[in-house]
Image: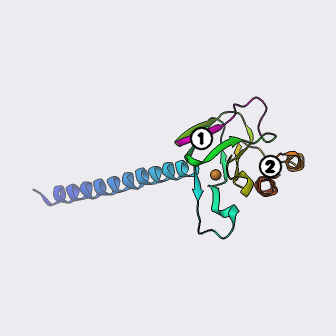
Amino acid sequence: MTLPRLVSRLRSRRFGYALAGGLYLVASGALGFALAQQALRTVDQITDFSASAASGMFRFAPDLVRIAPGETVTFLNSRGSHTVKTQRGLWPEGAPKVDIAGRLRAEVPFDQPGLYGLICGRHGKYGMVMLVAVGDVDATADDLAEVDSFRVSALAKAGFRRLLSAVAE
Ligand SMILES: [Cu+2]
């Protein structure tokens, strides 16, 4: 083998490694992003007896999810005591209601833009509520005022006000 040919072969191998390394980084980055996005859309229902307050003992994690229309949220652990239910008064008109109970995993597509309030049937009284914001929506002062009329506990109202404030204009 001539020297120039050897050099060119080494070069191409090095280039090959670099290319493979680059592709690996891109692929793992894309996978990491996809997993992170999926994690953001997975809501766990938590019972944590080490929490100091009841509102922390029973909670949705995360309790605020922002997604694009048509995306799906996966709800985990609606078995046993936790449920996931539509909060009347905080739901886009005509959007299908959510009522999850007795399921380890439930996938819910949210097609219509808007603000979706969800409450645990058992622990809503302790403030176990959450909000799904679909599309480019912000809560208005009217949305916040509307919370007063909800037939839920003071802790649940406080939870909805906190979540709506977080997505306020
Ligand atoms: Cu619950």
- Range of magenta residues: 91-103
Q: Is residue 134 left or right of residue 107?
A: right
Residue 50, quarter of picture: bottom right
Task: Give the residue number, with chain letter if any, for mark 1.
Answer: 101
Q: Are marks 2 and 1 in contact (CB under 8 Å)?
A: no
Is any part of residue 61 visible from this angle? no
Q: Is the CB of mark 2 within 8 Å of ligand 1?
A: no
Residue at left 29%, top 56%?
17
In the depicted view, which residue is nearer to us: 34 or 154? Answer: 154
Name the dominant secondary structure of the magenta segment.
Answer: loop
Task: Give the residue number, with chain letter if any, for mark 2.
Answer: 152
In the depicted view, which residue is nearer to us: 154 or 135? Answer: 154
What is the C-alpha distance between the residues marked 2 and 1?
A: 19 Å
Few, some or many C-alpha atoms within 10 Å of disc 2 (few <14, some 14-19, many ≥20)? some
Does 156 lie within the magenta span? no
Q: Give the residue type that dot 2 points to.
A: Val
Indicate the position of residue 101 as horizontal and vertical percent values. 59, 41
- Counting residues from the N terminus, which is met first, the one under dot 2 or under dot 1? 1
Does 101 lie within the magenta span? yes
Q: Residue furthest top?
A: 94
Indicate the position of residue 20 as horizontal and vertical percent values. 32, 53
Above or below residue 77? Residue 155 is below
Few, some or many C-alpha atoms within 10 Å of disc 1 (few <14, some 14-19, many ≥20)? some
Residue at left 66%, top 49%?
65
